[in-house]
Image (cartoon, helix red, strand yellow):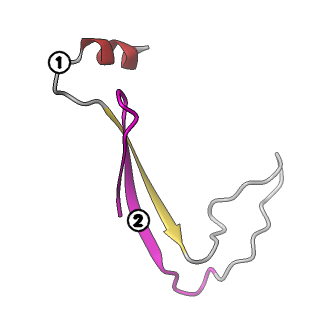
Amino acid sequence: MEVLKKIAERKSGNRIVFLDEFAVTNRPSLYYGWAEKNTRPEVASNEGKKREKLNGLLAVDAISGKKFVKL
């Protein structure tokens, strides 16, 4: 509810944004994965090999919903 209060009290011209960082790779990783509760994910991976990775930052304007992405 504190976010809603900040949105309501913001001064005109100011933005409120939500930020999240992310990474995309060319091969799957065993570090992150989805699986049923109490089981390990089974993902084929070449963990030992160098992988190409792209990092990014995503921002979403809380008022307009406009998205900004920086890679």
Question: In the image shown, does 65 or 35 lie closer to the viewer?
Answer: 65
66 sits left or right of 34 in the view:
left
Position of residue 14 relative to residue 8, above or below, is below
First to last magenta residue range: 47-71
Task: Calculate the distance from the C-alpha at mark 2 to the C-alpha at mark 1.
Answer: 32 Å
| Displayed quadrant of residue 17 | top left
Residue that appears at 62% across and 80% down: 47
Q: Amino acid at mark 2?
A: Asn
| Displayed quadrant of residue 9 | top left
User: Which of the two discs, 2 and 1, sits closer to the camera?
Assistant: 1
Tell me the crowding category of disc 2: few under 14, some 14 to 19, or many 20 or more residues within 10 angstroms, Cα based.
few
Q: Residue 11: which numbered mark, if any?
A: 1
Of all residues shown, which one is farthest toward the bottom? 49
Point out the image quarter for the C terminus: bottom left
Point out the image quarter for the N terminus: top left
Q: Which residue is mark 2?
A: 55
Q: Amino acid at mark 1?
A: Lys
Asked which secondary structure carries label 2, the reply is strand
Does residue 6 belong to the magenta stretch?
no
Nearest to N terminus: mark 2 or mark 1: 1
Q: Position of residue 49 (x, y in %)?
A: 57, 87
